[in-house]
Structure formats: structure tokens, C-alpha cells
Amino acid sequence: MTVSATSVSGSMASVVAATDRLSRWLGRAARSLRVQVSVAILVAAGGCAVVAAQLSGAELEGAYRDGGRQQLISTAQAATAGVVDAREPNRVRRRLEALMAVDERLHGAAVRDPRGSVLAFVGTAPGDPTLSRRVTVAGRPAHTASRDGGVDITRVAVPLGDGADGAGTLELSADFAPFAAAVDRRTRHLLLGLGALLLGFTVVTALVLDRGIFAPLYRLRLATRRIAGGRLDTRMGWTRRDELGALAHDFDAMAAQLEEDNRRLEALVLCDPLTGLANHRHFQEELVTQIQRARTDDRPLALAIVDLDHFKSANDARGHPFGDSILALVGAAIRDVVPEAGFAARLGGDEFALLLPDSDGPDAIEVCEAVRNAVRAASPPDFELTCSAGVACLPADAGDAESLALLADGALYWAKGCGRDRTRRYDPEHVVVVTCEQRVEFAGLIEAGSNVSAHFQPIVALADGGVAGYEALARFNARQHLPASWWFEHAHRLGLGPALEATAVAAALAAPDRPPGTFLSLNLSPSAVLTDEVAAALPARLDGLVIEITEQERINEHDALQAALDRLRARGARIAVDDASGGYAGLQWVMRMRADIIKVDRGLIQDIHRDPAKAALVSSLVHFASCTGAEVCAEGIEHLEELRLLKGLGVTYGQGFVLGRPAEWWPEVDLDAAATCRVYDGERLPAIALRG
């Protein structure tokens, strides 16, 4: 069987990983006080058991040897009478053999004369003649012991007779090795028993220590970690009266003190000390929390920013103590007026913020008006306090905290720009604020081309009242109440203007069935004409198209723009200048662009039939156009009287509600307007005298 290198390496990796885990576990166990104490108790108990077994064995062995030796001496003394009476060697040997047969422990027996010579022996020959001489001299029993390999010999000698007549000695020897083996077995059994008892003692002691000391210490350690993690309400709550109970009591007291200190610090950190309201940091945290709650519960939320009027000048003129007293009065007034569910904060300086849950625009404006009245009522005798407020709502105006704050701040500056001492709700037509949320919205709108559609307004030839062409006007499906100018203005602020204009051009060109013989006018800003996005949206041939250059921005790259317009003309397009005589599109700009169509601003057309100066200026533009080969188109015609006069002045094209309103599909000219053009065809209108 072949074993692949991959499986071998995998097995080795598993073994290495298991070894590493075991090593880490052993390392943690070795550092554990619980394990260290348990091991120390076990080692100490084991040492005590070994020492006790050894001492007990030594004592027992000594007792065995003393008892055996004394018994051997008693046996020898009891046998001396028969030996003394039997002096003949053979009879003595028989007596010794009988003695050996009676006591199986005997290893040998011998009788010596007073000089130590052996008279007779049985078994092992005696090997220590000095023992008999010691007995003969002392007249009392003596003994010796010797060990040789597995033999443990003990010899005893007793005097024959009364010990004083020099009759000789009786010597007996016995092997005590069986006694020593029995003692060793008994010692081992004792050691095993003590070991089992001490192991049980160790386990019980460890459990008692774990339950009584280590487990409480571990819980105290966990509580300390929770305190370190910010959970200052952690308490041990122990009722035990020992040292650990005292430690837990001290811990609870420390945690309570930390919690109280932290509460005081939070109050200092999150509260404005001058007004008693929340400070800027607390407001930011609460704003995020309230927005998340409003989204979760699908409920509205209003943010109002309030700013004192002319506070800086009063503070500089009367000093900071006076300014501080004013701010304290304002803080108290706001605190008294804001609803219980609301949240009030001082953002800094003389600016305050109100968070109003479950409030839409009218509700928030009502609260702001109450705040303004309360601030005015709190004015000191020699100074009138007024304030301005700006309101923005979620989700109607914005969807995140940053955008909501920006829009409310923009509404506040709108209120100040309107004369102060008033409240304004965010309105995109009056508040110019660029938020990240708006950029995302614009990018999504451009990416999804279906959000942009085209409507068309007829451009009428005033000579006969027929449709000469159509101006493509962008319409937006999102927030339809906002004018198209708002979308393009904000798109350019966000850097997305060219992309949005290219999308609008593509939507206009995609409209089918344009009436034959009519041209299509496309609005483009000067900067967009120079971009690749717009170039990609335009077809290769531009016959039947009018590129209408708007006046929304100032142009610095005149040469580059003129070159781009020349390239468009070469592809068949005509160039129109929008809002001539208005904005930045002055006569000098009209001459530089060599426009094919000059579109006169509606401000010059409005009530032209009542203003001879306007009529004279339009007449001069018509003359200029005829001299340069251009045509004039009057925008914003809303009355038949204006139409009659413009036709009489020789204006080529007209555009406005009186001629035809924008529509989704190629609208017709109003019948009355067309009839007016035809009635005055060929007639000369009377001159209008200028007022002197």
C-alpha cells in the first residue's frame, strides 16, 4: 500500500498541533495555584507515607530480630542441661540433631570447650570461636549477626552449666532472612495502605480547598474582570464571615465607590456645566441612538438647531460673565419648554440642539417657536434675547446623523439670512448643502437611467405659428416636487454634473417619433460639453440637433469650449446660447460663441408689451442677429400680448406656456397662440415710444 506524502504531512501536522495544545494546557496547569497546591499536598503526603513506612519497617524489623534472638537464647539455655549431661561427642551430636529437628529455624548447632574448640556440631559449622570465649569469660549469653548475600545468620552462645565452672558453651545459629522478607512484605503493604489513605486525603483536601478558597477566588477574579470591562454594578454579595468574606465585602465597597465616581465623572463629561444641558459629545451619542431607534420603530425624528441672535457682539461688549449669565438663562428656558421625550443639548458657544422623537416638521416648528418665545421671555431687563432655529426631519429630509445635522444647520443659516428671529424648515430650494447621502442618491439616480426622463416643450416659429423644434427638459422620478435646476445644481456641486447631463441627453435622444422637419434642442453646461461622458452620449452625426449652452456657471476655458463647439458644428449641430442678456451670458459672450440661435432670458420678455425699454433691447438683439446670421428665440412667453409684440419685433422663435407646456410626447402648439401668430403675419406693429 502506498501512503501519499500529503496524508503523512497531514498526520504529522495533526500530531504537532495536538502536541502544541497539550503543551499549552500543561503550561497553564503548571501556572495554576490550584494545581500547584494539590501537587504540593500530594508530594508531602507521599513523602510522609514513605518515611512512616520506612520507620515502621525498621521498628518492626528490630522487634522481629530482638524477639527472635531472645527466643533463640531461650532455646539454647533450655538445651544446655541435656548437653552437659552427655559429654560424649556422639551423644552430644545426637542431642544437637534432636534439637535441630525440633526447631526448624535453626541453621546450625555446636558445642565448644572452654578454649573454643568444637566438640560437636550439626548443620552449618560454627564460624566465630571468639563468641564462645566471650561467653566463657563473661559467664552470660552473647550473640552476633552476619549477612552474606541472601543469608542473614544470627548466632547465640550460652554457657554450659552455671556459667562459672568453665564447662564450655552451646552455640546455635539461625537464618533470619525469612523474617526480613516478611518485614519487607508487611512494609510494602503498609506503604500501599498509607499511600491510598494519603491520596484520598489529598483529593479531599484539594476539593475542600477548591470549594472553600480557589473557587471563591476564581469568582472574585471574574468579578474583577467585569469591573475592568466597565460593569461597575458587579457585586459579590457574600455573607461568609471568614477572611474571604471580608475580602468580598471590601471588593463590593470598592465597586460601589467606583460606580459612584464613574457616575459623577459621566455627569461631568456628558453635561454642560454652564447650562445644565447635555454637551456636544452627549448630543452626538444621543443623535446616533435616536436615529437607530427611529429606523427600528419606523417613526419620525426631528432635529432642531437653535442659535442666539447677536450674542457675540453683546458678549464682546459686556464681557464673558454677562454672556455666561445669558447662556444659563437660555439653558433654563429650553429645559422648561422641551417636551419630556425630547433631548436638549448645548453644542458650543451660543448654539443649542433639540432632538424631538415622534415629531415631524410642523411639530418641530411648534416646539422651536415655543423655545423662541421662552428665550425672549427670559431676557434680562436691559437686553432683548432672540434666537433663530433650523429644522430637519428624518426620514423626510435625511437618512443618517451627519446629513440630518448638516441640513438642520443649513436651515438655521437660511433663517438667519432671512433676518433672524425666526424658524425655518429645511427646503432644498433655499438651503444649499452637500451631504454624503445626497451624493449616494445622485450616483444611484445616474446609474439607474430610468430615474431620468425627458419632457419636450415646443419651440414655435412666430412667422406662422408652427412647431420648429422642441427643447428637451429633464424630469426626475425621485422627489418630483423639486425643480430640475435643483438636481443639476447639486449634481455639479457633487462632481456628478457631466454624468447627469449625459444621462438626460441619452433620455431625450431615446424618445421616438419626433415630428419630421423639427429640431431637438439639448441643454448642456459649458463644462459638460468638454467631458467624455457627454461626448459618449451624443451620436456621430448631429444633424437636426441644437446644442443649447446654459449659463449656470462661469467659463474660464473659452478657447477649449470654442474648439469643442466648432467640432459639434462640423458634425451638423447648431449652437444656441441660453438666457442671453441674463446671468453671465452677456453680449460679449454671445459674440465670442458665434451662436446660431440667441435665446432671450425670460426676465427680459416678461411684460415686454408694457416696457418700451425691454422692447428696444430685444429689437436691438434681433438686428444684431440678422447682421450675424443668427436667429432669436424668446423664452418665457406667457401672454398673447407679449407674443404679438415679439412677433412684430421680428423675433424668429418663441417658447413659453402661452405657446405650449412641456409634455412627455411632442406637444402641439396652443390654437389661440398659433392663430395670433398667423393673424399678425405680415402686419407691422406700431412703434412703442420710450418714456422720457
Image (cartoon, rainbow, N blue to C red):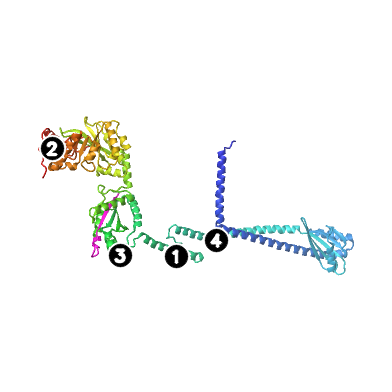
**Residue neighbourhood size for the residue with mark 2, other residues' Cα within 10 Å, grouped as few (<14), some (14–19), many (≥20):** some
Q: Residue furthest top?
A: 516
Q: Which residues are magenta?
A: 374-394
Magenta stretch containing residue 387, yes or no?
yes
Task: Relative to 29, say whether 618 is above or below.
Answer: above
Horizontal side of 124 relative to 630 (left or right) equals: right
Residue 326: percent from left, percent from top? 28, 62
- Dot 4 falls on a residue whose secondary structure is helix
Residue at image coords 36%, 55%: 285
Residue behind mark 3: 321
| CB within 8 Å, label 1 to label 3 | no
- CA–CA distance between discs 1 and 3? 42 Å
Q: Nearer the viewer, mark 2 or mark 1?
A: 2
- Dot 2 falls on a residue whose secondary structure is helix
Magenta stretch containing residue 496, yes or no?
no
**Which mark identifies residue 644?**
2
Residue behind mark 4: 209
Q: Residue 574: in sight, yes or no?
A: yes
Residue 566: percent from left, percent from top? 27, 34
Q: Nearer the viewer, mark 4 or mark 1?
A: 1
Amino acid bearing label 1: Ala
- CA–CA distance between discs 3 and 2? 69 Å
- CA–CA distance between discs 2 and 1? 94 Å
Residue behind mark 1: 253
Q: Earlier in the sequence, mark 4 or mark 2?
A: 4
Amino acid bearing label 2: Arg
> For residue 563, what is the image quadrant?
top left
The quarter of the rendered structure image containing the N terminus is top right
